[in-house]
Image (tube, helix red, strand yellow):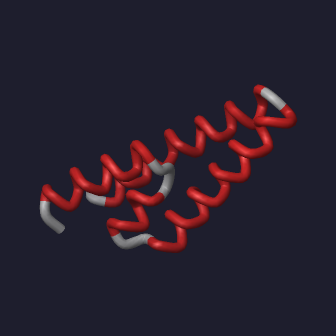
């Protein structure tokens, strides 16, 4: 993998949780993180802060997993 792929993956993961790692090659993990983040964001509308925190943690984990995929 090139540095350009790593940069693109991290940018995608910044804006869409989990899809950066799917772009990098780990599709199953990426789609799982993305779907979980979407569900948590939708649930945060009705149930409040706890699901917002979980969605943020999923976003952060998606960024971390994308970065670690290239190590």
Q: Please state if 60 lies on the left or on the right of 56 as rendered.
A: left
Q: Is residue 3 left or right of residue 50?
A: left
Answer yes or no: is residue 43 visible.
Answer: yes
Question: Who's the residue at 85% across and 36% down the image?
Answer: 46
Quadrant where the C terminus lies?
bottom left
Is residue 63 toward the left or the right of residue 30 in the image?
Answer: left
Residue at 78%, 36% in the rendered image: 45
At x 42%, y 45%, the residue is: 15
Q: Is residue 45 above or below residue 17?
A: above
Quarter of the figure with the N terminus: bottom left
How far from the left and from the top, in percent, is residue 54?
68, 38
Residue 38 x %, y %:
65, 52
From the top left corner, tell me how far across and down residue 11 is, in percent: 31, 47
- Asked if residue 35 is positioned above or below residue 17 in the image, the reply reads below
Residue projecting furthest to the top: 49
Residue 71 visible from this viewpoint: no
Left/right of residue 51 with respect to residue 31 in the rendered view: right
Residue sitting at the far right:
47
Toward the viewer: 14 or 21? 14
Q: Quadrant of residue 32?
A: bottom right
Report the label total.
0
Query: Residue at image x 33%, y 66%?
Result: 24
């Amino acid at each position: 993998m090139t540095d350009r792929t790593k940069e693109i993956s991290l940018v995608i993961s910044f804006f869409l949780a989990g899809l950066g790692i799917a772009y990098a090659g780990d599709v199953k993990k990426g789609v799982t993180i993305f779907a979980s983040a979407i569900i948590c964001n939708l649930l945060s509308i009705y149930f409040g802060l706890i699901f917002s925190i979980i969605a943020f943690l999923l976003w952060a984990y998606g960024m971390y997993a994308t970065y670690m995929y290239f190590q």
